[in-house]
Amino acid sequence: MDKKDASKYNTREHTRINVVPIVTKKCPYCSNTLSLSETVCPSCKNKVGEPDKEGVAKIPGTWKKYVSALLALTILVLYLIYGRDVIAYIKSMFF
Ligand SMILES: [Zn+2]
């Protein structure tokens, strides 16, 4: 087998691997292989979600981080506009 044949073979092999249906997923934290039904990685105890097209489990609850970041930004903007009145108002809601 010369070099050309080897590269052709590798390309074909790569394609074949890509069309194999996903039956396991990979932990995004520790790269442990998990079954599709698992929601917590037994190895690192982190929560994992559905696999993406590469078979790596998504990190669940990412949208919550965006929401809380947006909320923090909103509070900051309100604070910049209205100053300490907003802080007093927020405190009055919770205490
Ligand atoms: Zn893990």
Image: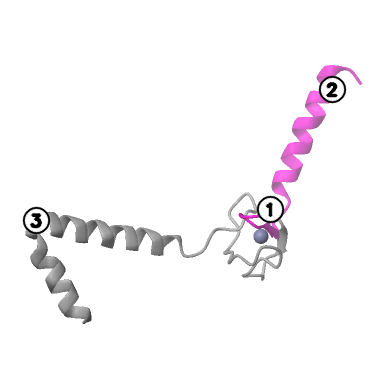
- Which residue position holds label 3? 81
Of circles 3 and 2, which is in front?
3
Name the residue nearer the viewer: 48 or 1.
Answer: 48
Image quadrant assignment for residue 47: bottom right
> Left or right: where does residue 51 sit relative to residue 90?
right
Residue 83 visible: yes
Crowding at mark 3 (Cα within 10 Å: few <14, some 14-19, many 20+) = few
Q: Residue furthest bottom?
A: 95
The amino acid sitting under disc 1 is: Ser
Name the residue nearer the viewer: 53 or 31.
Answer: 31
> Left or right: where does residue 70 sit relative to residue 84?
right
- Which residue position holds label 2? 5
The amino acid sitting under disc 3 is: Ile
**In magenta segment, residue 19:** yes
Tally of numbered tags: 3
Of circles 3 and 1, which is in front?
3
Please state the quadrant of the image where ligand 1 appears. bottom right
Of circles 1 and 2, which is in front?
1
Question: Magenta segment range?
Answer: 1-30
Name the residue nearer the viewer: 82 or 12.
Answer: 82
- Which residue position holds label 1? 31
In three-dimensional space, the C-alpha distance between marks 3 and 1, rounded to whole angstroms, equals 46 Å
Q: Quadrant of the C terminus?
A: bottom left
Q: Quadrant of the N terminus?
A: top right
Name the residue nearer the viewer: 80 or 65.
Answer: 80
The residue located at (70%, 45%) in the rendering is 18
Q: Position of residue 48 (x, y in %)?
A: 59, 64
User: Ligand 1: does it lie within 8 Å of the C-beta at label 2?
Assistant: no
Crowding at mark 1 (Cα within 10 Å: few <14, some 14-19, many 20+) = some
Which callout, 1 or 2, points at the residue further toward the start of the chain? 2
SS label for mark 2: helix
